[in-house]
Amino acid sequence: MSSGIRFDRVSVAYGKNTVLDALDLTVEPGEVMALLGPSGSGKTTALRAVAGFVRPASGRVFIGERDVTGLPPHQRGIGMVVQQYALFPHMRVAENVAFGMKAQKVPKSEIPGRVAEALDMTGMASYARRFPRELSGGQQQRVAIARALAIRPGVLLLDEPLSALDAQLRSGMLGELARLHRELPDVSILYVTHDQVEALTLADRIAVMDKARLKDCGTPQELYRAPRTEFTASFVGNANLLPVRVGSGAVSFGATDLKVDTGDVAQGATATLCVRPHLVGLGDGPNALSGRVAEVQWRGATHRLYVDVAGERVKADLRELRTPPGIGDEVTLHFAPEDAVLLGAGVTDG
């Protein structure tokens, strides 16, 4: 099967409501691309356009070199796993896995071997005779993945596949999906999620979407360490976003000057300074910020402090403190110049 996906200015509308707006995006052969965004951002619509469940109002969808925009789903050579798995309750596991191959008219002699292969790959070989009702949620999800893989697709579409699982199962399945990707290096995977941990863990690249448009795209490391927009900074990971005015090699935050790399941003411009909470320390240090503790949250291995500084609430994630400060205490936070990123330069004075 051909691999790779290309969106060529794909738009989808329901009446006058545009739910996907001129999407240009390429998923390379063998790549895992996560579509990450809030509800209503257009990510699931983009996946359904690849699957053939929605027809673009404009633009083209390609799988490999094939223009599949006008093809029905069963002619696209894709595997798909949806949020609720959609297993047939009256069929045993092996029959569920075989269903897609029968629909594609795979020779009957090949089907048992490919069912066994797919179930073995997903760790479900010993459950072939069971019905879906006899399986846990995680096991049902594995069967759904086995069914998608059995047709040997060039493209695998995953639509919020872990959202119905509890936290422990979700963590285990993330590892299983990563292993499957290593075993299927030629399969392109488009993975829709609103969960940043899933995207950061699995994806080679992440496409960040909001309000029907693509906002940003890059590797997880690029988007986390050097986000280009405030939306990316706040949605990929957690961030302190502080309003600042740019000076020469420094910025002013309230009455405090902070040393950061200002790049080629003009002096006098307004901008936003992004600092990840886990890079903020407690006590004296470079780029010190003094304020009053507004909230303390114990999170097991860490404490999250919320500190009011110059009219903004600054978050600091600290290794579990033996004696955390109390609400109302005066504290000093700090961060290294190299741990801050300047975003969204605006107008200059004058």
Image (cartoon, rainbow, N blue to C red):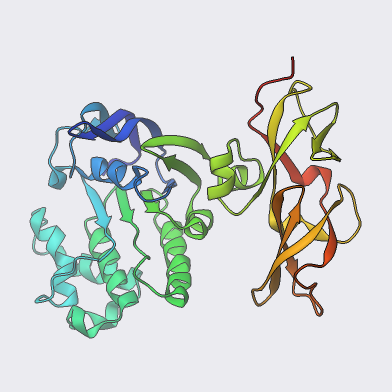
- Residue that lies at the very extreme toward the top in this rendered image: 350
Question: Which residue is drawn at the image coordinates 17% and 74% (left, top)?
Answer: 94
Q: What residue is shown at x 90% (from left), y 54% (from top)?
A: 285
Residue 323 location (% of width, % of height) = 82, 78
The relative height of residue 153 versus residue 83 in the rendered view (above or below) is above
Location of the N terminus by quadrant is top left
In this rendering, would 192 be left or right of 68? right
Residue 228: image quadrant is top right
Q: Is residue 68 visible?
A: no
Q: Position of residue 294 (x, y in %)?
A: 71, 64
Please identify the residue farthest to the right as the structure is shown. 284
> Which of the 4 image quadrants contains residue 283?
bottom right
Look at 21% across and 46% down and name the residue there. 77
**Is residue 146 visible in the rendered structure shown here?**
yes
- Residue 191 coordinates in the image, percent (x, y): 38, 52
Locate the C terminus and report the quarter of the image it occupies.
top right
Q: Is residue 70 above or below residue 200?
A: above
Q: Is residue 234 left or right of residue 119?
A: right
Query: x and y percent of residue 29 in the render?
Result: 39, 41
Specify whether 91 is left or right of 298. Answer: left
The number of callouts visible is: 0
Q: Determine the residue positioned at 9% across, 56% down.
A: 103
Which of these two is toward me, 159 or 187? 159
Q: 178 or 135, which lies in front?
A: 135
In this rendering, would 247 be left or right of 221? right
